[in-house]
Image (cartoon, helix red, strand yellow):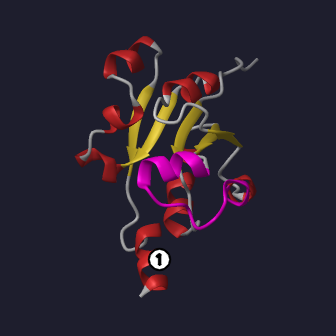
Amino acid sequence: MKKNKKKRVLYTGGTFDLFHSGHVNFLKQCKKISDIVIVSLNTDEFIFEYKKSKPIVSYENRKKVLESCIYVDQVVENVGGKDSKISIKSVNPDIIAIGDDWAKKNYYEQMNFTQEWLDKNDILLVYIPYTEGISTTKIKSIICS
């Protein structure tokens, strides 16, 4: 008889504005390393506060697109804003995944947690390879030029 294996829950967060192949590649890689992928989606208000600009696509529409992605099991609202620990704790993940473009930035400060906090909560932080050549920023620059 096979033992019941605990399903690995992966948490990732972001804006996912102008959903594109880079987003799909990222989420596909997330699904390869976990059983359940939960996306914490930034609200329009938080995006404006953080980036000083509004997303092109509204929260509700970005949520619908993510929910239709075969690599996403659940979408939750980033209820903590700058303090991601609130949303993370609500999901209770085993893994947090981010793009490796964050490797050169202070992701811990961005998310308002420490390695000690991750260790205390038994959460592994993994970096997923960034898809070169496409980004929401590049798409916006083409549209606006």
For the stretch drawn in magenta, the main secondary structure is: helix
| Residue 39: quarter of image | top right
Pinpoint residue 102: horizontal percent, then vertical percent. Answer: 32, 47
User: Taking 4 as reference, is 13 above or below it?
Assistant: below
**Is the C terminus in the top left, top right, bottom left or bottom right quadrant?**
bottom left
Q: Which residue is mark 1?
A: 139
Furthest residue in direction top, as rendered: 120
Q: Residue at x 69, y 57 (%)?
A: 69
Residue in the foreground of this view, choosing between 135 and 73: 135
**Is the N terminus in the top left, top right, bottom left or bottom right quadrant?**
top right
Residue in the foreground of this view, choosing between 71 and 46: 46
Amino acid identity at mark 1: Ile
Q: Is 61 displayed left or right of 139 in the figure?
A: right
Furthest residue in direction bottom, as rendered: 145
Secondary structure state at the residue bearing disc 1: helix
Pinpoint residue 82: horizontal percent, then vertical percent. Answer: 46, 35
Pinpoint residue 85: horizontal percent, then vertical percent. Answer: 50, 25
**Range of residues picked out in magenta:** 44-62
Q: Residue at x 59, y 65 (%)?
A: 19
Q: Residue at x 57, y 21 (%)?
A: 89
Pinpoint residue 63: horizontal percent, then vertical percent. Answer: 70, 53
Q: Is residue 131 magenta?
A: no
Q: Residue at x 72, y 20 (%)?
A: 2
| Residue 132: quarter of image | bottom left
- Can the viewer see residue 29? no
Give the total of numbered labels.
1
| Residue 36: quarter of image | top right
Residue in the foreground of this view, choosing between 21 and 59: 59
